[in-house]
Each structure stands twice: as structure tokens, then as C-alpha cells.
Amino acid sequence: MIDFEAKFGAYLHDYKKEKAMSDEALDEVAPELYLEWLESKMSWLDNKSPVDHFKAFDAPALIEQLGGYIISDITLPGVLLNEIADTKEQTYPFLLTLLKTYGGDKSDIVKQTFIRLIEEMDMAHPYEYYIEVIANADEKSDFVEACAQELKNSGEDYVEQMIVEFEQAKNTYVSDCFLDILCDISFDENVYQIALEKFLYSDSNNSFYASCLGKLGNANAISYLEEALRNEDTGYYDYMAIKNALEELGGEVTIDRDFSGDSDYESLKKLEE
């Protein structure tokens, strides 16, 4: 893997020395120098420019290079990403296949990068695969969260499928993950009832379920949120989340509580002193 960032850094070092420039002066011209450098032929690239270097790679080789850079912790060259995007009709199928099948080194990081690239290329996301990833998750991970984030943009076509997965969830993280996605997509009466039941009958995570009700926008939840605010057992952290949800739904908070002695309240108070 060629470290293009290091190569350009060395070029800037020599340029600064040759021109006897200050750091400030170099910073001003660096962007323009970079564009010129990208178009310049380099001996270490067999007399090709950085821009032209990756044009010689076919689609599978470009994706292989992409994975290699991620695994090696070398900064991804912009010229590589540009070439993958410019040839997206050819590179997308290979990107999609590897996203679904890769299980090697730094799998989560590699796959997160693939997801971001699919989004930047404006190509179709494999939403059913993302649902499968979340449904099989044993715990929270950055890759699972990346799948969840993209599913929030999937529209209504997958709502019923995600409700089924929510009902069959293998653990609390999976069920909460699907609920969070569903509440971000659009209002659905079934989703509202699920979020309301979770808020009313769960022994923990009430702040999260309150935020779900707030996002869904059903004003019928206001009375339940107000009742929770009046409950003396509602701690400061949950109180603030419930208050925010209530206000998001157009409700007015008239319930004043003294949280002296509450651990969350006291910790925040110390930070503000």
C-alpha cells in the first residue's frame, strides 16, 4: 500500500525548505499545491500521476485496494475513493458482495467504510441485510449501529419486517435498536403502541422509551408522560428525557420537582459549579 498522505507530506517538507517558507505561508498554498501534486507524474508511480495511478485497476482490484488500506491503517487516498465512485456501476457489486461476506481482519471497520461509501456513491443500500445484521447482534457495535442509522432512511417498505424482528428479538439491545429505527421512519399506530407499552411497563431505560414517544409525534402520549413526571420515583435523568419528549409533542411542563440528593442531578450540579 502506498501512503499517499506521507508522500505529499514529504513533498511539502521539501517545498517549504526550498522556498524558505513559514508554516503559515505553507498552509495558505498547501491546497493548491496538493491539486498540482495530484496531477504530477511521479517516479515512484512508474511515471504516472496519483490521479492516473488507480485508473489502471479494474473494479475487483479497486475494492481490494480499499480493503487493504483500511486493514493497514494507512489513510485512504482520496484518488482511490474518487476512482471507486467514478466507476460505481462496476465497483458497487463487488462492494456489496464483500459487505455481506467479509469476515477477516478489522471486519467492523471495513464494513462501516463500505456502508459510508455506498451512501456517498448514492447506490442502493442492502436494507434486508442490515435488518439481518441487527437481528443477529449479541451486543452493540459500531457496525450494527451503522446499519441501524442507514435503516432510518429506508422508508416504510421495511416497517412490517422490522416489527416482526422486534417481536422476535433475541435480546433487549436488538429490540431497542429496531424500536429506535421504527420511531425515526414515520408514524405507525403499531409502533406507537409498542413504544407506549415499553414506556409504561419497562423497569428501566424509560428515558429512551420517552424519546421514542417524542419522535413519533402522537399527542395522545402527553397524559402518560405527565403522569410519569409526577411520579416521585422518576429520577432526574429520566425526568429530563420525559420532559423533553412532552415538550416535543406540544405539551407544557408545569410540574416542578426538587432533585436534591439524586445522584445524576448532583453530578451535573458539580460540573456546572
Image: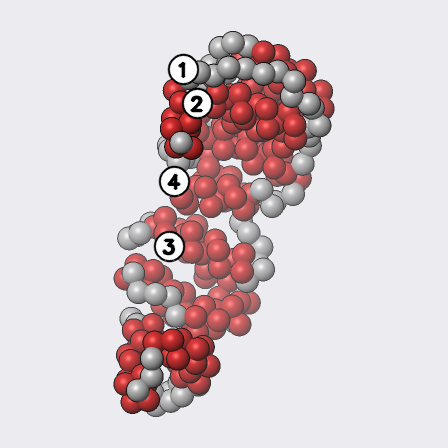
**Quick one: which residue is furthest to the front in this view?**
273
Where does label 1 land, which residue?
Answer: 261
Q: Are marks 3 and 4 in contact (CB under 8 Å)?
A: no
Label 1 crowding class (10 Å Cα cut-off): few <14, some 14-19, many 20+?
Answer: few
Check disc 1 and give the amino acid type. Gly
Does the image show residue 31?
A: yes
Instruction: Say which of 64 and 177 sits in front.
Output: 177
Q: Is residue 151 above or below residue 231?
A: below
Where does label 3 land, which residue?
Answer: 110
Check disc 2 and give the amino acid type. Tyr
Q: Nearer the viewer, mark 3 or mark 2?
A: 2
Q: Are marks 2 and 1 in contact (CB under 8 Å)?
A: yes
Residue 7 position in % (x across, y down)? 30, 77
**Mark 4: secondary structure:** loop
Where does label 4 land, which residue?
Answer: 141
Q: Nearer the viewer, mark 1 or mark 4?
A: 1
Which residue corresponds to the image point at 33% horizontal and 84% vertical from the top-left? Answer: 21
Which residue corresponds to the image point at 33% horizontal and 80% vertical from the top-left? Answer: 22
Residue 133 position in % (x across, y down)? 45, 40
